[in-house]
Image (tube, rainbow, N blue to C red):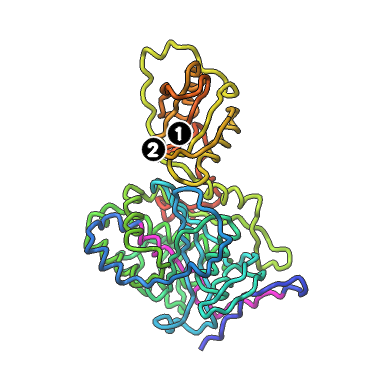
Amino acid sequence: MQRAAAPSPVYSAHASPTPEPPERGRLWRVLGWVSIAMSVVLVATSLTAYGFWRRLDSQIDRENVDGRLGDDRPEKLNNSLNILLMGSDSRQGENARYGVEAGQRSDTTVLLHISPGGESAIGISFPRDSMVQMPSCEKRNGAVVPARFGMINAAFSNGGPACTWKTIESLTKIHIDHYVEVDFAGFKRVVDALDGVEICVPHRIDDPKAELRLRAGRQTVRGEQALGYVRTRSLGDGSDLGRIRRQQTFMASVVKKATDKGMLADPGRAYATLSAVAKSIKVDDRLTLPVMQKIAGSLREISAGKVRFVTVPVQAFPQDPNRVQFDRALAEPLFEAVREDNKLPEPTPPPVPAQNQNKLPPVPPREVRVGVFNGTGTPGLAQRTADQLTERGFTVVKVGTSKKRYGRTQILYGVGAERQAARLAIALPGHPPRPWKSAKPGYVYLVIGKDGAVLRGRTATVPKVAGEIRADRDICAGA
């Protein structure tokens, strides 16, 4: 029998930090199970029949966590979707065969961010060895665990998925919409339902402890072999960051397989995969059947090339060389980009009519007096767009919300403001300006509709992060 794993350390201002003993007995240091949770939304695009969805929905375990998230939560700023994916290391029930571990932690934590309209997705991994401030949390039995400083994966044992959810929100200021928890008992079922997952091994592996024998190079693993691959200690340097990178590579391979056209074209195969996923996950009770169908619909056109994986930038934790802490200078731009993600697919700018080509040139941005109005109902959208225009030199005179909802963004102008409107249209391509008789003379009005207001030359929604992995990459690249 394996010994119980040492609890994650908790630090206080009155005690010297004590390093956590190495977890030599832990088998699941390199699990890729969160990739299974991702496939629940990425494969689902081929299943539109309501009866299929009903059968799948009945297989999913749900939990209400609303009352344990507290009132001090980040505001939801846009129409993007943030799903917290957690891999639990529980040894209860079906998981008992994988050894004995005291307590329950989130051995894997990934924030899946889906941009508005399902244009792209990014999975952000949080290293389990990160030392963070965790808020107070309420357990399922009503007991309250006070706020504390410790390893981020301890939040799960403090108060289950709700506490991890609350912790990630407090650290990133990103509003999380749903959570998906996966234990590893269903890992083999889902890998088998996918008909195996492709991996690439840099050298031959013969690991009796993990019951794993693999040749070097590209190959497809199934069932026990896949399980052994994510358990083996014969790859990498044994660090948590190395584990995450291998995990991300595995997730990328699952996404690539799940979005494969052959799978999406075979409803029976896709249903078998989703059924295996449904039996292996636990979610919040707000992730209902209609919500899942909506997510599936928004991701209908997504491809592996639009899915990438990054790790929160970290640096050494001064008190303990075996731990890390967030590198705030690098992490905050990543968190901010996710919070502020208003980007929708850019519309193709219409051709400029010939009669307009000889008109007077547009004026400088500072001479454009513009009012920005939110016509979508998304909180804060007008102010964020106004701030971006101000940064580019435009003179924003008013920010407000339209009572009417608009499907398309419009640039309207009053008498004498045609050149000013033309200058704004250069910054916002695809929205030809037009006069408005009710407009104030000399003023321009930007009314933001559901198709968004993406400024020309704006940087990518989420910045590139060193070491990021795209789901369409060659599985053997860098192996």
Query: Which disc is residue 434 wearing?
Result: none
Q: Residues within 10 Å of mark 2 (few under 14, many from 20)?
A: some
Residue type indicated by callout 1: Val
Q: Quadrant of residue 258?
A: bottom left
Q: Quadrant of residue 389?
A: top right
Which SS does the magenta portion mostly show? Answer: loop
The residue that mark 1 highlights is 447
> Along the polypeptide, which appears first: circle 1 or circle 2?
2
The residue that mark 2 highlights is 406
- Against 369, residue 74 (above or below) is below
| Measured Cα–Cα span from mark 1 to mark 2 | 8 Å
Q: Could you tell me which secondary element the residue under label 2 belongs to?
A: loop
The x and y percentages for residue 191 are: 34, 67
| Relative depth, front residue between 277 and 199 | 277
Q: Are marks 1 and 2 in contact (CB under 8 Å)?
A: yes
Q: Is residue 420 magenta?
A: no
The x and y percentages for residue 468 are: 51, 52
Q: Which residues are magenta?
A: 18-41
Left or right of 393: which side holds 458? left
The x and y percentages for residue 372 are: 51, 33
Q: Is residue 37 magenta?
A: yes
The x and y percentages for residue 89 are: 49, 75
Q: Residues within 10 Å of mark 1 (few under 14, many from 20)?
A: many
Q: Could you tell me which secondary element the residue under label 1 belongs to?
A: strand
Residue type indicated by callout 2: Tyr
